[in-house]
Amino acid sequence: MVSIQIGAALAQHLFPAVGAQGTTALRVGLAALILLAIRRPSLKGVGGKDLAALGLYGASLGIMNLCFYLALRTIPLGVAVAVEFVGPLVVAAASHRSRLDVLWLVLAAGGLALLAPFGAQTLDPVGLMLALAAGVFWGLYILFGQAAARIGEGAASAFGMAAAAVIVIPFGVASAGTRLFDPALLPLALAVALLSSALPYSLEMFALPRLPRSTFGTLMSLEPAIGALSGFLLLGQHLSLRQGVAIVAIIAASAGTALSLIAAKAKVPPLV
């Protein structure tokens, strides 16, 4: 989480040169090359069902990143992460489906309502919708990632990132053209690719087959806070009180879901 949020903050320094679409193409394309070079995966013995799972995993990964970077053009990093985080939160709650999970979903919805575009400190509605779309594809990434991991963590992360690159690079080329190949951008683009994609998605692909999807979705409850802190320290982004309360509500909803799941597995009353 720390790696991916620092990478997201650094990525915004590429926006003036190549735009959000070009930044996404650089991040995902370079990450795919890094993972393919390191992992050197093979498709030998991979059947049609596994290829389909890889394709869906890669597509959800690519579109998630594209929507998220498009959202960052107009809304703060911490807010974007909080809105996006609703996706895995819903996956976690849906896989458990207790009465208490309804309460946590209501709390998360309340946090989203606080971020709605009204009042004195209005956030860009298009940016909010793009962040919410990124959350939908994040939830799909969790679902498809577990299926893709059947072929092995290393191969799945490498081929999944390559599939994501095929999806997003045309958007980057259409937006930035030959500016994508400016050598001066390479050091920062490589740092973003490593921090935002190659390292965290490799770690997540290692974790996905070893954790229930509900647990994976809820263990990341601190990510909105890390995003807000990264935005403040690296980008000078300040949140309003209402935005801060909204982020805390979403974090609390995620943490509450995690506690509910832990309590259910231990067969004891929830610690909330």
Image (cartoon, grey):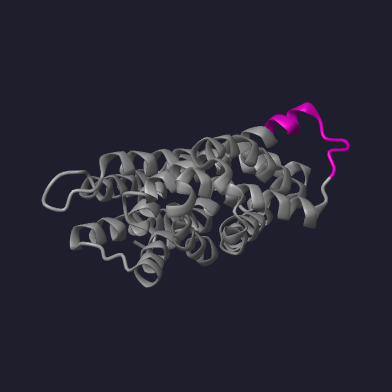
Vertical side of 50 occupied by 69: above or below? below
Residue at the far left in the pictured view: 120
* In magenta segment, residue 51: yes
Quarter of the image where one finds residue 52: top right
Quarter where residue 25 is shown: top right
Question: Where does residue 79 sit, x and y in percent of width and height?
Answer: 33, 54
- Quick check: 91 left or right of 207? left
The front one of 4 and 89 is 4
Q: Is residue 214 above or below residue 13?
A: above
> In this view of the protein, which residue sits in the foreground, 6 or 272?
6
Total marks in image: 0
In front: 70, or 216? 70
Kindly give the residue lying farthest to the right in the view shown: 44
Identify the magenta region.
42-53
One can see residue 93 in this view? no
Q: Is 53 on the left-hand or right-hand side of 76?
A: right
Question: Within the magenta stretch, is there residue 245?
Answer: no
Percent x, y for residue 15?
A: 44, 53
Location of residue 121 in the rendering, given as x and y in whole percent from the top left corner: 16, 53
Residue 179 shows up from this direction: yes
Q: Which residue is at a point 50% across and 59% down the rendered structure image?
A: 219
The answer to which quarter of the image holds residue 233 is bottom left
Question: Between residues 263 and 12, which one lies in front from this camera angle?
Answer: 12
Residue occupying the point 57% across, 59% down: 185
103 to 47, vertically: above or below? below
- 200 relative position to 12: left or right: right
Residue in the image at 58% along x and 35% along y: 170
Residue found farthest to the bottom: 233
Q: Tell me residue 272's x, y (percent).
A: 34, 61
